[in-house]
Image (tube, helix red, strand yellow):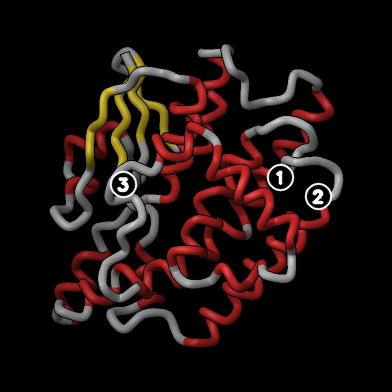
Amino acid sequence: MLELYHSPISTCSQKVRLVLAEKGLAWTSRLVTFADGQHLTAEYMKLNPNGVVPTLVHDGDPIVDSSVINEYLDEVFPDTPVRPADAKARARMRAWRQYIDEVPTPSIRVPSFNAYFVPIWSQMSEEAFIAYTERLPLRKHFYQRMGRGGFPQKEVADALDRLRQSLERMDRSLAEGPWLNGADYSLADVSITPTIVRMEDLGLAKMWADLPRVGDWYDRIRARPNFAVAYMPGSRDLGPSC
């Protein structure tokens, strides 16, 4: 039995839902509501001590971290693989995944959190906000750096610069094949998809207007059957601020 504790708007949750849908796996949805603090309850943190989503529970055993979850799913359910069979190609895929986890994934959080969370935090007192962030086991300093008013313009600009770097790297790689790792769709494509979707939702699609290979890749991504399944209702609703 597969259970996924997730949130529709969470990019890391979207990444795992893409793989579940790609493989056609049946799973039970356990929605986690951030506004209610469900990710910080003692019950949930027994499953995931980081207090974040997603968490996959397979036959009662929790697996955490979206990149780890996706590799686990491909190992345990090898049909419709999302990793290359060739060891060198698999290493290149993992290099992509590592880069994505280190550069574009944290970068997209800056404009995303400004758009989604600032309208919520601005209604809280400073004391309540600090008290909330002190409860966060993984991202306390990230939230405190953001503050109730959002990240400063310099940090937003730096994040957008890193996202542009990622797009340019994608464009160069896509000259060698339709997918980031060559001929086959893989976890490299899965890992970057939520960032590109979020960029579009934030009005940043113009950032790849001069990179047609990226635009063509995104068209192929959206045409895949797993896309519509993974982007369940509410997945792209960042609220009126967007």
Amino acid type at mark 3? Pro
Residue 57 image offset from top left, x and y in percent = 33, 23
Instruction: Tell me the SS state at disc 3.
Output: loop
Report the side of 234 relative to 80 (left or right). left
Which residue: 15% across, 73% down? 128
The residue where tag 1 is placed is 96
Q: Which residue is mark 2?
A: 173
| Placement of 214 over or under 112, stated as above or below | above
Residue tagged 3: 8
Label 2: few (<14), some (14–19) or many (≥20) C-alpha neighbours in 10 Å: some
Give the quadrant of residue 158.
Answer: bottom right
Q: Disc 1 marks which amino acid?
A: Trp
Closer to the N terminus: mark 2 or mark 3?
3
Is label 2 in contact with label 1 (beta carbons under 8 Å)?
yes
The foreground one among 189 and 206 is 206
User: Which quarter shows the N terminus?
Assistant: top left
Is residue 35 found left or right of 72 in the rendered image?
A: left
Q: Position of residue 242 (x, y in %)?
A: 35, 73
